[in-house]
Amino acid sequence: MAEVLLSPFLDVVMEKAADRLLLKFGVMWGIQKKREKLERMLLAIQSILGDAEERQVRDPAVKKWLAALKDAAYEADDILDEFNLEVMRRKMEIQVDMKKKSYRMLMIGYGMDLRMSRCIDRISLISDQKIEGV
């Protein structure tokens, strides 16, 4: 089984989480605190990632932990990609009825909030698993 290399990918996810437009629309859609929590969690994980990536060669538990974390990071990346796509679409809209726009923004914010909560819970569960020496 190939080694799990997560550090470079996590850097990309971190950049997306800190994107300027995401910050702006995150406040509008009420998911700013979850975005910040996701960013903090990823930073904490990055601090131990190098050691874990080295240890996975000789410790199957670490390798399994990294694989689960990688899967959760891909989920976070997908959510951030969808969010960024929605932000870009919003910027390109020209004239929209305010009621319709407000309702859609509320629904989008709710959906993103729910998905981010699930992703954060998943990453938290994975990162809380104690791997000896990591």
Image (cartoon, rainbow, N blue to C red):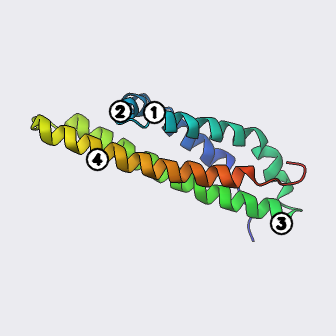
Q: In which quarter of the image is residue 95?
A: top left
- Mark 3 burial class by Cα count in 10 Å: few <14, some 14-19, many 20+: few
- Mark 1 burial class by Cα count in 10 Å: few <14, some 14-19, many 20+: some
Name the residue rendered at 85%, 61% in the picture. Answer: 57
Q: Name the residue under label 3.
A: 60
Tag 4 secondary structure: helix
- The vertical placement of 22 against 103, above or below, is above
Q: Which of marks 4 and 2 is in front?
A: 4
- Alpha-carbon distance for marks 1 and 3? 36 Å
- Alpha-carbon distance for marks 4 and 1? 15 Å
Residue 133 visible, this angle: yes
Name the residue rendered at 43%, 37% in the picture. Answer: 31
Q: Mark 2 points at which residue?
A: 25
- Mark 4 burial class by Cα count in 10 Å: few <14, some 14-19, many 20+: few
Tag 3 secondary structure: helix
Q: Name the residue under label 4.
A: 107
